[in-house]
Amino acid sequence: MSDPKPTEQPPAAQLEKHDEAAALAPEALQANDQPLEAPVAAPPATIANEEAEPQALQPTGETPTKELSTANHDPIAPLSEATKPESSSPAELPEYITKIAGLAQFFEQLPKIVTETGYSEMWGVHLKSHEDVPTVNVLIKFLRANEGNVQAAQDQLRKALEWRKQTDPMALVESGRYSAAKYNGLGYLTTYEQDGRPLVFTWNIYGAVKNVNTTFADSNEFVKWRAALMEMAVQDLKMKDATEVIDYDGTKDPYQMIQVHDYLNVKFLRMDPVVRVATKQTIEVFSTAYPELLREKFFVNVPSIMGWMFSAMKLFLSRNTTRKFHPIANGANLAREFPAAIGDQIPKTYGGKGPELKDGARTVPLVEDEVKSEQVDRENQPVQVASEMNAPPAPEKSEQTVAQDATATPGDQPAMPTSQPTKDAVVTEEVKPVGEVAK
């Protein structure tokens, strides 16, 4: 009688090892659907039991039949039908929940994450339950970005929600205004059609940077500008309108975009400190707030010194992301990377037949710097206006005033006003040298 007990232990131990391996290597479980159908069936059963604990913990099949029938106010089913409670249970989970390891646990924690952060919007999707397809796709992307580590995926989602709550990136698109002197010609968005779905491109033209300090000195503003461009692209993906669940392994995921970074004529890659800070901050924010939205990233017209950037990205991004990076020495070869239907729409500069970015692409709202505009207006005024030849004559001094000036010492001069000059005063002072040159 003592022999059967030890024979029951090895299967339990093997199952525990299987669950541990599934958590540590989800990509291996998703590599081949058919061979994995049998082993994957065990963990989802455990997940489902955790959600429906009262039914799962019943010792026999007869007891749950009575409870389910009582709850539904139906007559007790015959014993022959009691063998199929899961197939008729209203609480049965969808197939994608049981197929993707860790997704059910992720959904169990979603209400808590939303409550703690006080925010529920992600990429235009308001996070709901596992029955909402757009929500499912969002969680799959976070899970995939963390290679199946449920706890890491939850932590990243929490940080991303906190960042969106604080930054409100959708408002950056709708009401944000960015300096044309800093960002004009630096970022574009194009959307083409492929197989009835939008194929979104974002273009970052770093060769258009006119002044490194002007563009990158305020790293927070630079990140906001980049986030605004990214949000425009995310809106074009239309994730909130999804009706089909994406694949965990990414083979069927239309909600991803193409990014192109052009380094033609870039002269700041010797890494000015302000560029390094802005680049690092951008990578950190985007790797946290926009996981698995990238289909491919092309670095075109790249010099050899770019190696440091690829090394830096590998420190913050997952292997699933870095394998999508493609350096191209000659930007004119970019169109060859796509089917002809897409390649022909790409701008001519990049080997396609489409209009140039400045003519056919969209960008974030840009405004001229106000102070600079006033300065330009004043500089365009006739030179004689600022000339001292047309200045009104100085009032004649009385004899008493002349005597006081003759006897005054430097210490007797009146103190300078302590108030700050107005904007107009500053602009006038900046224009003053023009008058002196004219004189």
Image (cartoon, rainbow, N blue to C red):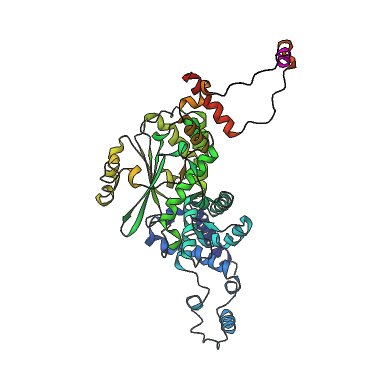
- The residue drawn where x is 45% and y is 63% is 99
Can residue 400 be found in the magenta stretch?
yes
> What residue is drawn where x is 39% and y is 31%?
266
Residue 46 magenta-highlighted: no
Q: Pick out the residue farthest to the bottom.
A: 75
Residue 292 in view of the camera: no
Q: Quadrant of the N terminus?
A: bottom right
Q: How many marks?
A: 0
Query: Taking 98 as reference, is 68 left or right?
Result: right
Image coordinates for residue 22, horizontal then vertical, percent: 49, 56
Give the residues in magenta. Answer: 394-405
- Closer-to-camera residue (36/145): 145
Does 118 appear above or below 326?
Answer: below
Residue placed at 51% from the left, 82% from the top?
Answer: 82
Q: Is residue 307 left or right of residue 287?
A: left
Residue 263 in view here: yes
Q: Is residue 210 above or below residue 115?
A: above
Residue 6 x %, y %:
57, 63
At 51% from the left and 78% from the top, the residue drawn is: 85
Q: Position of residue 354 (x, y in %)?
A: 28, 46
Q: Position of residue 306 (x, y in %)?
A: 41, 32
The part of the image, by quadrant, that contains residue 235 is: bottom left
